Image (spheres, coloured by chain):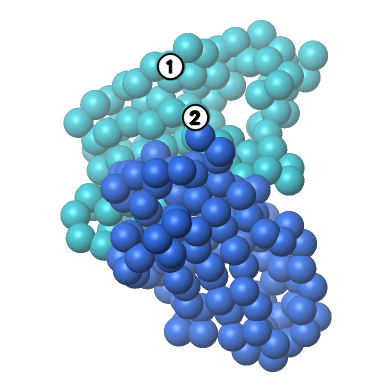
Amino acid sequence: DQQVKQNSPSLSVQEGRISILNCDYTNSMFDYFLWYKKYPAEGPTFLISISSIKDKNEDGRFTVFLNKSAKHLSLHIVPSQPGDSAVYFCAASGSGGTSYGKLTFGQGTILTVHP
Amino acid sequence: ETGVTQSPTHLIKTRGQQVTLRCSSQSGHNTVSWYQQALGQGPQFIFQYYREEENGRGNFPPRFSGLQFPNYSSELNVNALELDDSALYLCASTWDRGGGGYTFGSGTRLTVV
């Protein structure tokens, strides 16, 4: 079963506009959520995270929103730049025991930002 | 900090063979996790090692095994390779199980023929 889902395989956005990437999860034990960016031939790079005690976290052009009741999170990139073109993965982890630190990833969304 | 390095970058093996993939964790990181990423999918958690002991395992059979060494390097061993084991294998390290702040290597692309 897919506990973390990214339902949009791809997203195309014009440079300067907002990119919104979405992620849904089913496991209510998840309490920490992360976004990773991956370029071809490289490993995933950490972008931003959010704890379940918050509903928003900002870091420069990147903002993550968490809606716990809907089990939904989103990543907003404003303004989008061509260098943001990559695969974006949503990931989640729980706390306590052996689930601590184990990341469950979504399938990824390919973001393309056009100049 | 030297980052996370993995070797080899590419590998081709025959079905039934055994393979060992290697990872050198970021300096000071005592926790390492291994992930399998099939084409078009997100990484799937294989297992995690913390202070040289297995500290959590995903839904992978026992023929996937690992080791972590005191110098922060680690290995992923896969026995009796199957065609479906063809994937990108990612190593990620952090300090004290991290809760998510992992640094990933670039991966080893394994092809089983």
Q: Does mark 1 fall on the same chain as mark 2? A: yes
For the residues labelled 2 and 1, the Cα–Cα distance comes to: 9 Å
- Identity of the residue drawn at 77% across and 19% down: A114
Classify the position of the C terminus of chain B by image quarter. Answer: bottom right
* Residue B99 visible in rendering: yes
Residue A4 lies left or right of residue B90; in this view the side is left
Q: Amino acid at mark 2?
A: Leu
Residues at discs 2 and 1 in contact (Cβ within 8 Å): yes
Position of A62 relative to A73 (above/below): above
Q: Amino acid at mark 1?
A: Asp
SS for dot 1 = strand
- Identity of the residue drawn at 33% across and 59% down: B50
User: Residue B47's quadrant in the figure?
Assistant: bottom left
The cyan-coloured chain is labelled: A
Residue B89 lies left or right of residue A92; in this view the side is right
Question: What crowding class fits label 1: few (fewer than 14 Cα within 10 Å), some (14-19), or many (20 or more)?
Answer: few
- Identity of the residue drawn at 47% across and 73% down: B66
Q: Earlier in the sequence, mark 2 or mark 1?
A: 2
The residue that label 2 is drawn on is A47
Q: Give how far across and how far down residue A101 sits, in percent.
A: 33, 51
The residue that label 1 is drawn on is A59
Position of A1 relative to A92 (above/below): below
Q: Give how far across and how far down residue A55 sits, in percent.
A: 28, 25
Q: Nearer the viewer, residue A29 or A20?
A: A29
User: Residue B51's quadrant in the figure?
Assistant: bottom left
The blue-coloured chain is labelled: B
